[in-house]
Image (tube, rainbow, N blue to C red):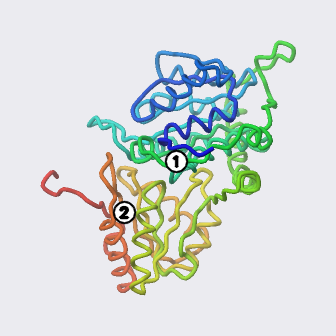
Amino acid sequence: MRKLLKGNEAVAYGAKLCRPQVISAYPITPQTVMVEKLADFVADGELDCEYIKIESEHSALSSCVGASGAGVRVFTATSSQGLALMHEIMWVASGMRLPIVMGVANRALSAPINIWCDTSDVMAERDSGWIQLYAADNQEALDSVIMLFKVSEDKRVLLPSLVTIDGFVLSHTYEGVDIPDQDTVDKFLPPYKPEHAFLDPSKPMSLGTLGTPATYMESRKQVEDAMRASYDVVKEVMADFAKHFGRKYEVVEKYMCDDAEIVIIALGSSSGTGKVVVNELRKKGKKVGLARIALYRPFPVKEIAEIAKKAKVLAIVERAQSYGHTGPVYADVAAVLAENGIKTLLLDFIAGLGGRDIVKTHFEKVVEESEKALKGGKAEKPIQWLGLKEELL
């Protein structure tokens, strides 16, 4: 079935098809429609699920931890300040190895108060032990929810995960989306059989108890090992998804990268604008490509290294800043280059914060600066902010 859906609705349909047994969430712009739509499904009898209404995002994720610990499939959703309020419990969920799936409509963090898109909210959680997938369109948003349940519930992983869509740019924009039939999803994603259910009276056990210096490091190393293992599982699940549904996804989508001297690296919906610019520059004979990172945690080290070995310049366009240093994606890519002894020039462009549009001229500026660096053998300004209004500084 094909329907015209907002990004939020696409995520909700994806969650519904996975047959969660508990949903606990709190409304916050621009995510609210995700949980409203799921509430409609439950109220209309289309989804047999316990829908828990709570008083905050902290309580929402805490409820999910309890439900997942009891051994059922769980979904939640949030944005921005809501995700920040969940921060304490994000670490609890990963440390307890609970396969919760969350939808996030990206939104800037305050202050000043801002309800529009950037990725500062999810980037602030990149070290909390959650798998992260960034969707570029509404179809990928729906499909990613289904794939992430299968990844998170895999015995080799058992980690929570989130699918992120750009607030308003995708969350409130309509696109044609293919909604899979329930039977096909059921074959792809069978009922959840928990590896550990600590609220099962017949098999009592404890999770999340005191971790002394004698055990804490080992427990966090297990999270790291599971996160590393999830990389191969994600690729397996993506390949299996293609067989069942006919749509192919990659941890890094490569667009005209094979012979590119300059490769733009982007996440989310801005990659679409970047592809348009790549097409136009290719017609002018410029060897430019684009690599869209879909899987951000675990970081796709192998794919980025392969791209970097062929390119002469990597230019990163990202919607977040790690204040006092670089953009977070830049730091990750720089680590890949250092680990692999790759000398490719690296530039970082901070753009689109607080919902400011990332437009064609920004990508053209990225290529122009990359050409200067290529000609001079170094980047004069390795980190630049695009689209600033100088009179406001």
Residue drawn at x 43%, y 64% as measured from the top left: 316
Give residue 72's position: percent from left, percent from top: 73, 25
Residue drawn at x 26%, y 59% as measured from the top left: 387
User: Secondary structure under badge 2?
Assistant: strand
Which amino acid, by three-letter code, is at mark 1?
Answer: Asn
Which amino acid, by three-letter code, is at mark 2?
Answer: Phe
Give residue 51's position: percent from left, percent from top: 60, 19
- Residue that badge 1 annotates: 138
Position of 197 relative to 141 (above/below): above
Position of 250 relative to 165 (above/below): below
Position of 312 relative to 112 (above/below): below
Image quarter for residue 236? bottom right
**Residue 349: image tag:** 2
Give residue 36's position: percent from left, percent from top: 49, 26
Instruction: Measure the alpha-carbon separation of dots 1 and 2.
Output: 25 Å
93 and 259: which one is in front? Answer: 259
Q: Quadrant of the N terminus?
A: top right
328 and 358: which one is in front? Answer: 358
Give residue 302's position: percent from left, percent from top: 65, 66
Residue drawn at x 78%, y 32% as measured from the top left: 192
